[in-house]
């Protein structure tokens, strides 16, 4: 089966580099360059141009990538839709995140902030649940690969997402019990990963891979 992998905000194909999914063909859909005002549905529409709908395929989205995957599924249902560490709509967002919608917090992402690596990484280390140096270095490297304007536009698109345009059938929503960025307490019908943080697709890749393969076998 073709597995279309959708990375999260400020992430790319490296997010999945530890994931082993057997003989399935893994295809990472990198973030396109966003224009000001682009929404999650706009990103999804662009990605749909790369999908081979003549063969069985799955959308596997992490964080913001999970939102994009749901919008893609609303446009053309895949064989399997697997979400990891994401939201299914604003109803799963914490109150402090909902309070930011429409206030343009992305404007706070400035060259000054991005230049203060140490305090920025302290915050991310806690929110993302970074557990080891190699994962932390990978997160930093991915973040630095995006121009500041693209990070701002990704944040704006993710925060103001209202959920998929039409209802979609989610086959599995895998979520860590220690995800501080997207608390599991607000997630409907999650498959919990005990102790998993927001980037568990990296630091718990073997376990996540086994879970994904089990879901795909049901196809």
Image (cartoon, rainbow, N blue to C red):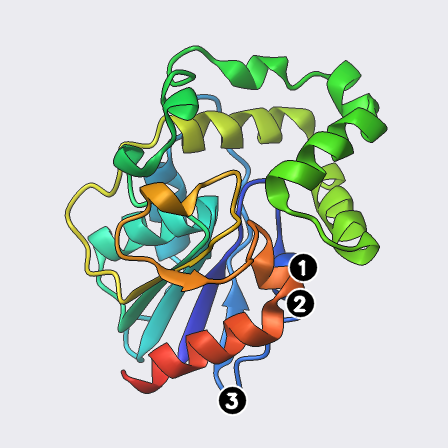
Q: Is residue 146 visible?
A: no
Q: Nearer the viewer, residue 75 or 22?
A: 22
Disc 2, SS: loop
Q: Quadrant of the C terminus?
A: bottom left
Residue at left offset 50%, top offset 62%:
194
Residue at left offset 38%, top offset 47%:
68
Given contact means CB atoms under 8 Å apart, are the residues at marks 2 and 1 in contact?
yes
Instruction: Tell me which label, 2 or 3, sits earlier in the chain.
Output: 2
Where is 167 relative to 169, above or below? above
Q: Is residue 165 visible?
A: yes
Answer left or right for 60 relative to 144.
left
Q: Quadrant of the N terminus?
A: bottom left
Disc 3, SS: loop
Tag of residue 14:
1
Q: What residue is pinned by disc 3?
A: 23
x, y percent for residue 43: 41, 42
- Spatial CA distance of label 2 from label 3 is 15 Å
Tag of residue 17:
2
x, y percent for residue 90: 29, 33
x, y percent for residue 140: 76, 42
Disc 1, SS: helix
Q: 10 Å neighbourhood of mark 2: few (<14), some, or many (≥20)?
A: few
Q: Nearer the viewer, residue 7 or 51?
A: 7
Given contact means CB atoms under 8 Å apart, are the residues at marks 3 and 1 in contact?
no
């Amino acid at each position: 089966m073709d597995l279309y992998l959708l990375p999260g905000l400020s992430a790319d194909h490296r997010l999945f580099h530890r994931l082993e999914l057997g003989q399935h063909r893994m295809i990472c859909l990198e973030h396109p360059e966003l224009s000001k005002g682009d929404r999650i549905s706009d990103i999804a529409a662009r990605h749909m141009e790369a999908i081979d709908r003549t063969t069985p395929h799955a959308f596997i989205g992490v964080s913001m990538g999970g939102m994009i995957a749901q919008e893609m599924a609303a446009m053309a249902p895949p064989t399997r839709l697997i979400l990891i560490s994401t939201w299914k709509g604003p109803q799963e967002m914490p109150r402090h995140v909902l309070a930011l919608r429409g206030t343009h917090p992305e404007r706070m992402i400035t060259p000054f902030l991005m230049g203060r690596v140490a305090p920025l990484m302290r915050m991310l280390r806690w929110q993302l649940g970074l557990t080891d140096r190699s994962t932390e270095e990978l997160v930093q490297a991915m973040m630095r690969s995006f121009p500041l304007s693209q990070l701002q536009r990704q944040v704006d698109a993710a925060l103001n997402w209202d959920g998929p345009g039409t209802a979609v059938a989610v086959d599995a929503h895998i979520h860590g019990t220690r995800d501080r960025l997207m608390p599991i307490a607000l997630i409907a019908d999650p498959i919990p990963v005990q102790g998993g943080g927001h980037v568990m697709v990296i630091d718990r890749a073997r376990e996540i891979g086994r879970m994904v393969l089990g879901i795909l076998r049901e196809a």
